[in-house]
Amino acid sequence: MQQLETPIGILGYGNQGRAQAGNLRDAGLEVYAGGRPGGPSAEAAARDGFAFLPTPELADRCALVALLTPDETHGTILAQLAGGASVRTLVLAHGFSLRFEDPDLHPSWDVVLVAPSGPGTALRTPAGAGRIGALIGVHRDRSGRALEKARAYATAAGCAPEGLIETTVAAEAEIDLFGEQAVLCGGLSALVLAAWETLVERGYDPEIAYLECVHQAALTASMIRDHGIAGMRERISSLALFGDLTRGPRVIGPSARAALGEILEEIRDGRFAGEWAEEVASGKKESRKGLEASRRHAVERARASLQRRPQPPVE
């Protein structure tokens, strides 16, 4: 196993940063947190017993830096890191900025990807530490040992050694964006909302529609995660199975499949990255507008009403 370069600097002390820093320290490594002094991250790191350094000082002290801040901050932070005297290895948890932007990377750095396949809250808990895998990849290998470093960092940060899957930075970035847009966030939220609206517009009770179309989605997702699609189908009623097999392809028919292909091509050719750059430049205007509309949607009133009473059993 590759010996990790130390000290290690963590930039971005959110759920992932906090979990990884704690696991790295438990592994006996010297760890610092970094970023903007006086902010919430600095206060949280201090409460957890980590020394907190401004980004330029972190770059002068740490041999390995993990950049775990939001993607839109990478350009500014990497420019600050590039002037540091000590950094030899850069770890990123997502390949977006490497794939779609041209960040300022010092020519001597090894640059690797370590993307845990679970939230930081799970990575740090006794039930999750050492059980969550990660995607690992190499963007630049100056030392000839970059992949070994990625494996060593992932393991010390709390990921399962047997759960590390090698990929390319480009593939991770493209698949991650597509998964978020087509299924995990965009596709799922659009589907359950459209189904709920279909029932409510035809006079059905909003709370019952919420239980069926929104609440139970998590239960089905858990079955798929634990048993696979075939295993989920083996565990539902024969009536539900027949409806799954005959109606599911109508929901995700040719037009939906064509839209999925278009979404993937927009990611691969950079159009989505360009839209995101415009959104960031606008102060995330459309994102704020969409989030506010989501908060005002009637489905949220149905959810709140259900939360005020005991949950009925679901099947």
Image (spheres, rainbow, N blue to C red):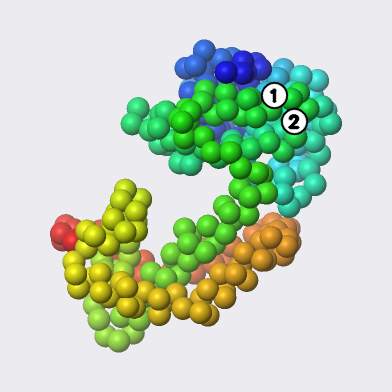
- At mark 2, the secondary structure is loop
Q: Is 129 above or below relative to 280? A: above
Mark 1 burial class by Cα count in 10 Å: few <14, some 14-19, many 20+: few
Q: x and y percent of residue 234 in the render?
A: 24, 60
The Cα atoms of the two marked residues, 1 and 2, are separated by 7 Å
Q: x and y percent of residue 65 in the render?
A: 67, 27
Q: Residue at x 48, y 28 (%)?
A: 161
* Nearer the observer, 209 or 108: 108
Mark 2 burial class by Cα count in 10 Å: few <14, some 14-19, many 20+: some
Inspect the image, locate mark 2, and give the three-letter code of the amino acid beneath it: Asp
In which quarter of the view is residue 61 placed? Answer: top right
Q: Which residue is mark 1?
A: 145
* Nearer the observer, 73 or 166: 166
Q: Is 148 above or below relative to 308? A: above
Q: Which residue is mark 2?
A: 141
Q: Are marks 1 and 2 in contact (CB under 8 Å)?
A: yes
- At mark 1, the secondary structure is loop
